[in-house]
Amino acid sequence: MSNRKMIYSAVLMGMLLVFAAGCSTAAAPAVQASSSNPSAPAGGGPGNVQPVGNLPVQPSAPIRSITVVGVGRASGAPDVANVNVGVETRAASIQQAVADNKDKMNKLLDALKALGIADKDIQTSNYGVYTERQPVSGPNTSGNEGSVTYQVNNQVSLTVRDIARLGDVLDKAVAAGATNIYGVNFSVADTSKLQAEARAKAVSNAKERAESLSKLTGVAVGDVLSVSEVIGSPGSIYEGPRMSMATGLGGGAPIQPGELEVNMNVQVTFAIK
């Protein structure tokens, strides 16, 4: 009887051991492959390339392209003129030279404003007082420094917004007492239209250059990848002829404003098909 109980106990213990082993196996977590970097997310994140087996990751091929610089030019007639006009006086005393210059300069300014030149278009560009000492020649000149003459020079920068009237303005300035006229320069008040025209021509020129290069290298030009204006030369203007004018003008000063040229450069990158 005791032997039978011992057999039953052994069988029961064996069944318990088998059941416990089965439960332990079912509860064990599955083993997953992970990166050697502890901070990397499991399974990889967006943008991460996961190698397949032992195969290396192949980088994407670079985009083939052609880069050229196009040049565009546009010309137009200037509509603004800038000129320096001034009065120079001399006297034996500095006070007299300054007073004479003041009187003549006021008459000149009054004449310019009577012609319709606005105050904002008249700006002092130079005012100077100088001493001229005449050398003494001949015997017994020791200690004699010669006579002294004082010179006063007053210049204004004048903007004329109607070029057709520039010749008349210069004549009237001389009649009013101007003794110096120089540095006539021409410009365009608004260059946006000329720049837009030159920019369009620059893009067209860039395409022509890319097509020429593609034919020479046996490839075909594709879409535009990037385009930018070349820094350092946007809207550069080639000015017309500059004039240096003398005093004593009469009968209408001959003025030739010529043309102004705007240059634009653009860099364009095209894909190669």
Image: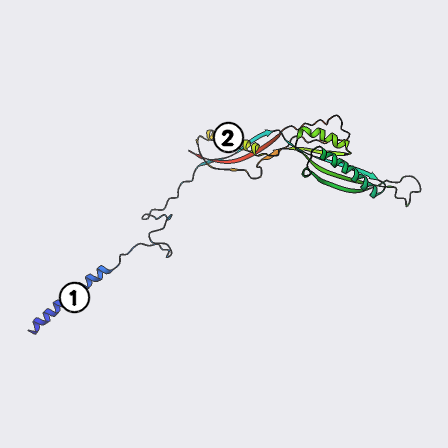
* Side of 184 where 2 appears, left or right: left
- Which badge, 2 or 1, comes first in the chain's sequence? 1
- Check the image and name the residue furthest to the bottom: 2
Picture disc at residue 16: 1
Instruction: Tell me the residue at 19%/61% (across/down).
Output: 22
As displayed, is residue 54 above or below residue 179?
below
Give how far across and how far down residue 76 sits, in percent.
60, 29
What crowding class fits label 1: few (fewer than 14 Cα within 10 Å), some (14-19), or many (20 or more)? Answer: few
Q: Nearer the viewer, residue 101 or 219?
A: 101
Front label number (2 vs 1): 2
Quadrant location, the C terminus: top left
Q: Which x, y percent locates residue 159?
A: 68, 35
Amino acid type, label 1: Leu
Are discs 2 and 1 less than 8 Å apart at CB? no
Render colour scheme? rainbow
- Residue 201 visible to an observer of this rendering: yes
Q: Examine the image and state in which quarter residue 177 appears.
A: top right
Q: Is residue 74 above or below residue 102?
A: above
Name the element at disc 2: helix
Residue under label 2, please give it.
Answer: 204
Residue type, mark 2 in image: Ser
Residue 71: in sight, yes or no? no
Residue 176 in the image: above or below residue 1: above
Q: Secondary structure at mark 1?
A: helix
Q: Position of residue 235 (x, y in %)?
A: 58, 35
Q: Give the alpha-carbon distance from disc 2 to disc 1, as whole Å.
A: 89 Å
- The quadrant of the picture occupied by the N terminus is bottom left
Q: Residue furthest top?
A: 251
Which residue is drawn at the image coordinates 80% and 38% (left, top)? 89
